[in-house]
Image: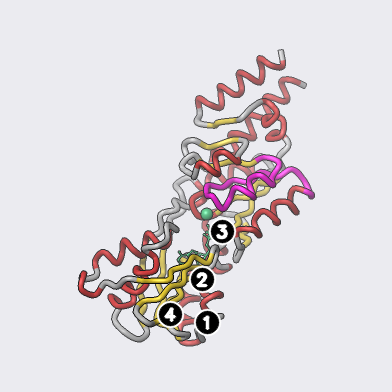
Amino acid sequence: SVPAAIASSLSAGARHGLLIKGGVIIEKLAGIRTVALDKTGTLTEGRPEVTDVIALTGSEDALLAMAAAVEAHSNHPLAKAIVARAAAVPAAAMRDATAVRAVPGKGMEGRVGTAALFIGAPRFAAERANLDAVSETIARLENDGKTTVVVTVDGAVAGVIALRDQPRPGAAAGIAALKELGVGAVMLTGDNARTGAAIGQMLGLEARADMLPADKADVIKAMAAEGPVAMVGDGINDAPALASAQVGIAMGSGTDVALEAADAALLTNDVAGIAKLIGLARATMANIR
Ligand code: ADP
Ligand code: MG
């Protein structure tokens, strides 16, 4: 019977760490033509590490100390990585920040002493300071797949910090498995175009970069109007995009908000689980029809 076929697919999925919230989702999954994936925390581990510290004026320690003073107020993965790296800075050099404010999808602002600090994406740092002195360095680091953040102090660039977030093991294979099913894959990221393209090339998919959190939901709505699309994400920021897709899929390690907004979840954080979900759904529907 149909209910029995669906029940057995739901439990087959569960045995492989694929959570599907009901039979209707199976029918939708079977029709998916394109999958959009968030980069950070979905295609990558979401645990960036600082690789380069380039100070233009003072010492590397002084730059890290200022950056960490502001980032201590953020729980963004980039912020945590910068704070962790600053743990090696002598305590006497460490600073405190005041008037700290997050600029979502862009960076952080705050005051250290009397100085006004911004730390964040180069294209937004460029609204506050002339980046000519560091633009070639930034391009080189980003073409290498690193994310760069720029520190500006009182309208002048103070330095650049580069971070690397490793692709998840099996992410490239998971994208290849989608292609074998004839399903398109596209990466959405708030990161810059060069870093996005470099990681997209490693994993074998197109990247749409420079996206603000709200842009992702708009892009998914436009894609969903063209044909059945699934969105895969892990963060609080991803919930609107997950809800805008025909099928929202959450990474199991993600936030509760993403899990709640999703129709399905990959409990083992394996990108290959997406193709397994679609394959299982297609087989189930073929059985029923
Ligand atoms: P993603 O799409 O990768 O999850 P976000 O939307 O969280 O990215 O952030 C986009 C960009 O904004 C980051 O690549 C970074 O340049 C900048 N950014 C956001 N938050 C911070 C922060 N706390 N510190 C520094 N840069 C930040
Ligand atoms: Mg994210």
Q: Which colour scheme is used?
A: secondary structure
Give the mark nearer the N terminus: 3 vs 1.
Answer: 1
Question: Which numbered disc, 3 or 4, marks the residue closer to the eye?
Answer: 4
Give the mark nearer the N terminus: 2 vs 1.
Answer: 2
Q: Identity of the amino acid at label 2?
A: Ala
From the viewer's perspective, tell me whether residue 250 is left or right of residue 219.
left
Give the distance between the C-alpha atoms of the residues marked 3 and 4, in whole angstroms. Answer: 35 Å
Give the distance between the C-alpha atoms of the residues marked 3 and 1, in whole angstroms. Answer: 29 Å
Residue receiving disc 1: 128
Give the distance between the C-alpha atoms of the residues marked 2 and 4, in whole angstroms. Answer: 16 Å
Range drawn in magenta: 225-247
From the viewer's perspective, tell me whether residue 220 is left or right of residue 11.
right
Residue receiving disc 2: 121
**Residue 280 got which mark?**
none
Q: Identity of the amino acid at label 1?
A: Arg
For the point 52% across and 82% down, the residue is 128
Question: Which numbered disc, 3 or 1, marks the residue closer to the eye?
Answer: 1
SS label for mark 4 = strand
Label 2 Cα neighbours within 10 Å, binned few <14 / some 14-19 / many ≥20? many
The quarter of the rendered structure image containing the N terminus is: top right
